[in-house]
Amino acid sequence: MDYQSTRGALFADEAEAILRGIAADGGLFVDPTLGERPFDWRHCLTLSPLEMQSMLLHHLLPGIPDMDALVRRAYSGKFETEDLTPLVSVGGDYVLELFRGPTAAFKDVALSMLPQLVAAAKEMRRDRSETVVLTATSGDTGKAALEGFRDVAGTRIFVFFPHGGVSAVQRAQMVTQEGGNVTVCAVRGNFDDCQTGVKHAFAALAGDGELRAKDLELTSANSINIGRLAPQLVYYFIAYARLAERGRIRVGDAVDYVVPTGNFGDILAGWMAKRLGLPVGKLVCASNANRVLTDFFESGVYDRRRGFFRTDSPSMDILVSSNLERLLFYVSGGNAALVRRCMDELSHSGLYRFPEELMGRLRAEFAAFCCTDAEGAEEIGRLWRAEGYLCDPHTAVAVRAAREYRGKSGSDAPLVILSTASPYKFPAAVLNAIGGAAQGDEFDQMDALARLSGVPVPRGLASLRGKPERHGDVIGVGEIPAYIKNKLSEDK
Ligand SMILES: *Cc1c(COP(=O)(O)O)cnc(C)c1O
């Protein structure tokens, strides 16, 4: 099937789109026929979560063979619950828990699947090279990528994190990582230094004759890859199926979804599910103090020229939400020239204005709200006291948006709030919000939170303490390329 660049007439089949990640013109790969080819969404709702995933991925990436087996390999036995993403009734609303995977972060849903898709794409193209995944991480993506790629044949993964710049739990998650094809290394500097260093390493190693001779291909596990986006539709279907089973809706009724948003991948997956027929009502885009998307939906101007806030919901601290580009492409009827113009303006001037008639279409499908850390903390406390439900600071942003949306719209459609992280990944903020006191290191805080709330610590986090550290290297930013080359030559 032909995937197309959002910025022009560049085409690639699904395997190439997955292996390249980004199109040569800087655009993102999209399926221009999304929603036009028939998809039996009603049948999809009757399936088990893994069967749903298989049906969806087969539809979105039809050329990849043996999807059932890939899906089983990606998820079987790795998630805490049979349902992958359980739907929990909280007050009158529903919380969709996306964090029941091996690393207790919602990125697990996609990063468990991506490595299987990469391996299958290589098989499809008879590509015998070894895929070397380079990832810079501010915490969550690195661990989820490590778990996904560990011991996947034909792949090798490097994760670089800022030395002293991730939480104690996140560091422990990464430096204890097992697997024969993984390397984790701390870099002296902050996350931006780390990311820049990895980008330079890509450039430095891309033309490296020795690596070529060894048949190594570099790639990245970042969220613009269609292989990371496609596995995210499934939980919109799972939530809808559970609401129908429980008699809360009849199949065909609209359901609203509220999504804590950063790079716009999660919420775009919801829009794609709607395009495949799922009766999605409003998609509510919830942002923290970095409110660039809230302003965009309000004004039609995307303006990244503003201060950057470090918040209690760090995975949403983003000023350029890459996946929005895909939505602009679709809503403009595939106007790649318009998308290219907007993206050029964004990179040259720091802003673009999207045509007002198209904004009207977007506003019919999306609502957008934002809140501060203090308002988020208030929601964590309120939900805990009123419902006995513990949520993390990212989810709290969505809980706030849900309440504001409900107040403003007067809609009485059922509301599903996507929950993207375990409260135990951010124990200090959560403890403080529910009236506890955060003391000691993060492991002490996890214990204190468990004692106070009675909510069990996720398996993957509880088992961390006492695990041997396997990756102790700390290097300078400039040493990254040489470090990678050394490690790769040790492999062979
Ligand atoms: C990545 C992430 C998000 C944002 O998801 P996007 O797809 O980038 O919008 C929200 N919450 C958590 C905990 C995350 O890790």
Image: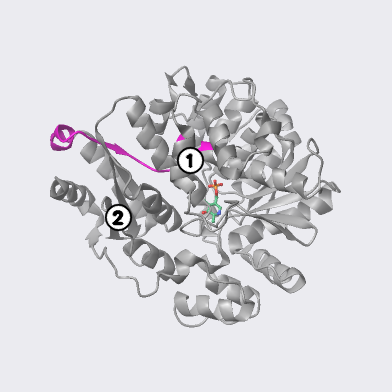
Give me the residue at 47% from left, 17% from top: 9
Place of residue 489 in the rendered image (x, y in percent of width and height, measured from the top left): 14, 46
Front position in the image: 70 or 138: 70
Place of residue 266 in the rendered image (x, y in percent of width and height, measured from the top left): 58, 44
Nearer to us of marks 1 and 2 is: 1
The reply to whether the magenta stretch includes residue 212 is yes
On residue 179, which mark appears? 2
Q: Which quarter of the picture shows residue 13?
A: top left
Q: Which quarter of the picture shows residue 44?
A: top right
Q: Is residue 315 visible?
A: yes
Front position in the image: 471 or 332: 471
Q: Which residues are magenta?
A: 208-230
Q: Residues within 10 Å of mark 1 (few under 14, many from 20)?
A: many
Q: Is the shortest distance between ligand 1 and the CB of mark 2 under 8 Å?
A: no
Which one is earlier in the sequence, the residue at label 1 or at label 2?
Answer: 1
Q: Secondary structure at mark 1?
A: helix
Give me the residue at 51% from left, 35% from top: 346
Residue 72 vs residue 177: left or right? right
Residue 299 vs residue 221: left or right? right
Q: Where, quadrant-wise, is the C terminus in this rendering?
A: top left
Residue 185 vs residue 393: left or right? left
Front position in the image: 443 or 208: 443
Place of residue 381 in the rendered image (x, y in percent of width and height, measured from the top left): 69, 72
Give me the residue at 43% from left, 68% from top: 169
Q: Amino acid at mark 1?
A: Val
Q: Which residue is mark 1?
A: 71
On residue 314, which mark appears? none
Q: Which quarter of the picture shows residue 131?
A: top left
Give me the residue at 23% from left, 60% from top: 475
Question: Do the CB atoms of the residues marked 1 and 2 lie less than 8 Å apart?
Answer: no
Above or below, 88 against 35 in this view is below
Q: Secondary structure at mark 2?
A: loop
